[in-house]
Amino acid sequence: MAAIAPGARTEPAGGRLRSSLLTTVLLLPAAIWYVVLLVLPLLIVVVFSFGTRAKNGGYAPAFVLDNYARALSKPEPFIDSLWMSAAGTIGCLLVGLPIAYFLATRAGRRKSLLILLLVVPFWTSFLIRTYAWILILGPGVGVGTIIGSFFGQGRVDLLGTPFAVLIGLVYGYLPLMVFPLYVTLERMDRTLVEASKDLGAGRWATFRQVTLPVALPGLVTGSILVFIPMMGEYVIPQLLGLGRTYLMGNALVTDFLDARNWPNGSARAVFLIVIMLVTITLYLWFVNRGRRTREVSVL
Amino acid sequence: MTAPAVPAAVPRVMRPSVRGRGDRFASLVEVWFRAHSALVYVFLYAPIFVVVLFAFNDTTGVATRWKGFSLRWFDVALNDPVVLKSLTNSFIVAVPNAILATLFGTMAALGLQRVGKRLRLAFDGLTYMSVIVPEIVIALSTLVLFATGFDAIESLTGEKPKFGYTTIIAAHVLFNTSLVLLLVRARLSGMDRTLVEASADLFATPWRTFRQITFPQLLPAIVAGFLLSFTFSFDDYVITTFVSGPGSSTLPLFIFGQVKRGVTPETNAVATMILGITLLTLIIGQVLLTWQSRRAGQKKGGIAAVVIER
C-alpha cells in the first residue's frame, strides 16, 4: 500500500512544469490586484505626501515636508479620532463581552439561531443602519424627547453630538468584536472553570485568572478589528455627528474631494497607515509571544 | 467499586451549603446575562425596524411623525428615475464584482496550498492588510492611482479613460477577493485530507479529484463568499464615492445625498428596498447552504457556520 501510494501521485514527464504553471495561474489574478490596487496606491500616497498641490488641484511633484508640518500643526482630527476610536472600542467591549460569553456558555440549543441573528445586521447595509440612528436620535421620534422630558429639558436633539457618533460606532462595529470573543470563549475548556471553583476560587478570581487569559486573544483581535476601521470612519461622523465631530475621515474627504489638495490629504493618510502598521505589528508580536495564545481568524 | 463514587459525590452535596449566598449572586448574574443579551438584540434590530416602519408612513410632511400605513412612498421611489438608475447601477457593479472576487479568491486559496511558506506569508500579509486598512485609505489611494494612471494613459494615447463602473468594480474586487480567500481557505484547512488522498490512490486524475472531492466540500464557503461580496459591494458607500464617475453613482450614494438634504419618507422606502435585497440574498444563501450540507450529510450548515466556524 505504502509503496503504491507515492507512485500513484508521481507526475508524468513535464508534470512539474505544468504544476508550477497552474500554481502561477491560480495566484496571478489576486496577486495582480494586491500589487496594482493595494501596494502601488499606498506607495503613491506616500510619494504624494511629499509633493505640493497643483494649481487646479491634485498633485505637483516636489519634495517638501510642508504637508506633514501642516498635519502636525492641526492635529485635532487625528487626536479626536484616537479618542473616539478608543471610546468606541471600550464600548464594543463592554457591550460585546457579556453577550459573547452568554452565546459561548449559556445559549444552549438556540445558539446557532442567536448567532445568525447577530450576523444578519452586520451584513445588511452599514449606511442604512447608520442612517437609522438619525431617525432615532433626531428630533421627532422618541429617544431625544424621552430623555428630554426625563430631565425636564424639553426636547433634546442628540444628533450632531459626539455621543451620537459614539453610539453609531459601537452599533456599527459590535459584531466584529463579538465574533472573535465568541470563538475563543467557545473553545475554552469548561473543566478549567470548574477546577478553579472546586479549588475554592471565587467568581471574580476565576474570571480574572481563568476566563480572561483564555479570552485574551479574542479580545485583542476584536479590539483591533474595531479600532482600526473606526480610525478612518467617515459615514458615522458625517451622518450622526453632522460633520461637527470632525474626525480623520472627514478631514480626508475634505482634502481629497472638496479642497482637492492631494498632497495634504496624503500626509494625513500616512498617519492612518502608520497607526495601522503599529497596531498590527503589536498584534503579531502578541500572537507570536505566547505559548498558549492562538491567532483567531478574522472571519 | 463504590469507593471512587464517594469523593465525587461529596462536593456535589456540600456545594449548596457552602455557597448559599454565592448561589443567589450566581442566579443574579445569570439574570443579568440574559437581560444584557436580550437588550443587545433590541439594540441591533430596533434601528432597522424604525427605518422599515417609517417607510410605510402615510405622510407628506415630517418623515418621523406617524400618520398611518401606506405604500405610497414605495410607489414614489419606484417611479423615481434617479432611484431606478441608481438601483441598476448598483447591480451593474455588484454582480461582476461578486463573480470576479469569488473566482480570484477561490483560485488564490487553492494556489496558496501549492506554494512555499515564504510566498504564503507574503500573500497572507497582503490579504490581511487589504481587509484591515481603513476603507477610506483604500478609497483615496485608489482614486490617486486611477487619476495618475489615467493621466499617464492620456499622455501616451491621447485618450483619457473615465471614472465609472470599471473603476468601482476594480476597487471593490480588492477587498472582496480577500474576503473570499479567507473564507475558502478556512474551509480548506478544515477539510478532510484523507478523501483527497484516497481519491489519488484510486488513480483519479487531479482534476477529477478536485471536481468530485475538493470542490463539493468548498462549495459552502464559495457560495458564502459570493453572496457576501455581492452585499458588500451593493452596500458600499466610501470607496464608491471616491472612484465613481458621472452617471455611475449607486444606491448608497443616492441615499447619502438625500440624507444630507434632510430625511424624507422616500429615503426610508429606498432604504427598506436595499435592506430587502440584502436580506433576500442572505436567505437564499442560507437555504442553499443548509440544503447542500444536509445532502453532504454534515451537521452544521448555513452562512453563520461557514463564517464563524474555523
Image (spheres, coloured by chain):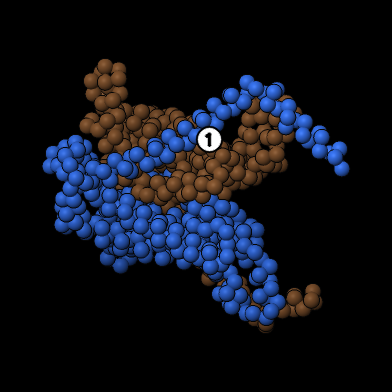
Chain colours: A brown, B blue
Q: Position of residue B155 (x, y in %)?
A: 31, 62
Residue at the front extreme, as displayed: B2
| Horizontal arrangement in the rendering, residue A295 relative to residue B268 (left or right) | right
Which residue is disc 1 drawn over?
A97
Of residues B295 and A269, which is closer to you in this image?
A: B295
Please say if A112 is above or below A71: below
Please say if B129 is above or below B220: above
Residue at the bottom extreme, as displayed: A13
Quarter of the N terminus of chain A within the rendering: bottom right
State the residue at coordinates (42%, 47%).
A122
| Disc 1 residue type (three-letter) | Leu
State the residue at coordinates (65%, 70%).
B196
State the residue at coordinates (70%, 30%).
A197
State the residue at coordinates (26%, 58%).
B87
Residue A105 in view (yes/no): yes
| Horizontal arrangement in the rendering, residue A2 relative to residue B207 (left or right) | right
Q: Position of residue B163 (x, y in %)?
A: 29, 58
Q: Quadrant of residue A74?
A: top left
Q: Position of residue A96 (x, y in %)?
A: 49, 36
Residue at the left extreme, as displayed: B60
Of residues B3 and A3, which is closer to you in this image?
A: B3
| Chain assignment, label 1 | A
Of residues B167 and A148, which is closer to you in this image?
A: A148
Residue at the top extreme, as displayed: A152
Residue A278 in view (yes/no): no
Q: Position of residue B27 (x, y in %)?
A: 57, 28
